[in-house]
Image (tube, helix red, strand yellow):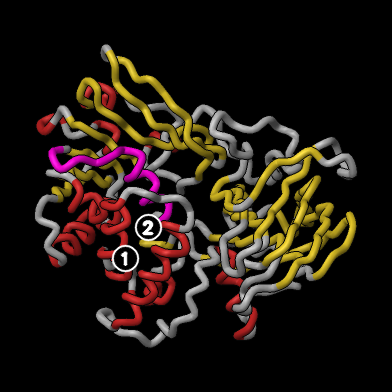
Amino acid sequence: MNTTRNQPAGSQLVALALFACAGCILDLHSASADTPAFDLAREHLVRKEIIGSGILNPGVIRSIRNTPRHKFVAPKFRKEAYFDMALPIGSGQTISSPFIVAYMTQSLEPQPTDRVLEIGTGSGYQAAILSPLVRDVYTIEIVGSLARRARSTLRLLKYRNVHVKIGDGFQGWSEHAPFDKIIVTCSPEDVPLPLVKQLKEGGQMIIPVGERYQQTLCLMSKHNGKLIQDELRPTLFVPMTGTAEERRRTQPDPLQPRVINGSFEQELTASGLIPGWYYQRQSQREVDSTAPVGNHVVRFQNDLPGRPSRALQGLPIDGRVIRALTISAWIKHEQVVSGEAAEMLPLIAISLYDDRRQELGRWWLGPWQGSQDWRQVSKQMRIPPQAREGILRIGLFGATGTLSIDELKIDATAR
């Protein structure tokens, strides 16, 4: 199957599921900012994507449930506010997905007496989630227009203990230091030294670090002036604004997009996750004696219709140079049944974005039903010249049964 921006209504549902399988089939397209439909959608999100994905902290769950995420995005994106997905907020930046916000907040174990520094205000949503859980939130955004809009939204919604500053977040906010906790919602290559200095002894910092499309979310604790690092999970944050992004030692190559660990032979991370892939749900790296390539495959298993079962990976693509991509993989599926909603189907899919993080289109292989032994599938897709990056998505997306994938590859064709 193939879809573009001119897809029919049924395909729109499928395409939306490629972002997240929240399963919320509420009519939000014509809803006003205060309609009860948003409350129902938010509750559905909490049950399916927050509690259902392992968030246990009662305060964090309550804050996600009470925070009107649709008021932190532009009106044209409000219908998608309660799917577990990032959304554009301008200047090439996004509002983080609800799950990653909840996960990062829970990891910091927020306390009522905490003074928290947030780097990368963005829309203000992360600060709003923290607000009822801690004493004060100090948040910094380098893009002035985003900072002013976030400040206005937070004031309008009466988050009085959130303090917004325009500036370089990696320099911290020294006049209010030291901080009990620091949360970084943009991804540097290494931890900025000023943030280490401004973290209280015994304090904690959660931060995504690493290469542009291969980041690891780390929880760090400060002891004797140094950080002790605990790797949590692979993740992906959009490119930063400023010199820190430009000065990365390792830059992505948008002229040669490729799948990282598409054969799934790399050993699991310390936290038991598959390297190179983020947003993993109901997925396992397993030994398979029948694997077409190597000894391991990724296996998605789900017995509850609508439950998320997926893995995602980001990759750079320069559509000015690349005319087409060919996606290929070996797949096997057993007793696969589509879910109750039209979008709950097993797929291999890719979404493309321009330099402003606006979506250009979505293409996919699949869906598949029933049972069938290993076979190779492939599809070529045309790349629009505006494309600058993509998100590769694999999984059952709410369908039930078992889907196994091996030797997933992307081959680029130049213009």
User: Percent from the top left, x then y, of residue 353?
Assistant: 55, 60
Side (left or right) of 85 relative to 114: right
The mark nearer the N terminus, 1 or 2, is: 1
Side (left or right) of 36 relative to 311: left
Evaluate whether residue 266 shows in this view. yes
Asked if residue 264 is among those painted magenta in the image, a careful observer would answer no
What stretch of residues is rendered in magenta? 98-113
The residue closer to the viewer here, 288 or 321, is: 288
Q: Is residue 306 above or below residue 175?
A: below
The residue closer to the viewer here, 334 or 233, is: 334
- Count neighbours of disc 2 (C-alpha within 10 A) and say few if under 14, some if 14 to 19, many if 20 or more: many
Asked if residue 107 is among those painted magenta in the image, a careful observer would answer yes
Quarter location, residue 205: top left
Q: Are marks 1 and 2 in contact (CB under 8 Å)?
A: yes
Q: Is residue 73 above or below residue 392?
A: below
Evaluate whether residue 356 shows in this view. no
User: Percent from the top left, x then y, of residue 390?
Assistant: 60, 55
- Disc 2 on helix, strand or loop? strand
**Amino acid type at mark 1:** Arg
Q: Tell me the residue at 54%/63% (across/down).
A: 19
Q: Which residue is mark 1?
A: 69
Q: Which residue is mark 2?
A: 95
Q: Tell me the residue at 57%/60% (across/down).
A: 308
Q: Is residue 226 above or below residue 39?
A: above
User: Percent from the top left, x then y, of residue 402?
Assistant: 74, 58
Q: CA distance from mark 1 to mark 2?
A: 9 Å
- Residue lying at the far top of the rendered structure: 224
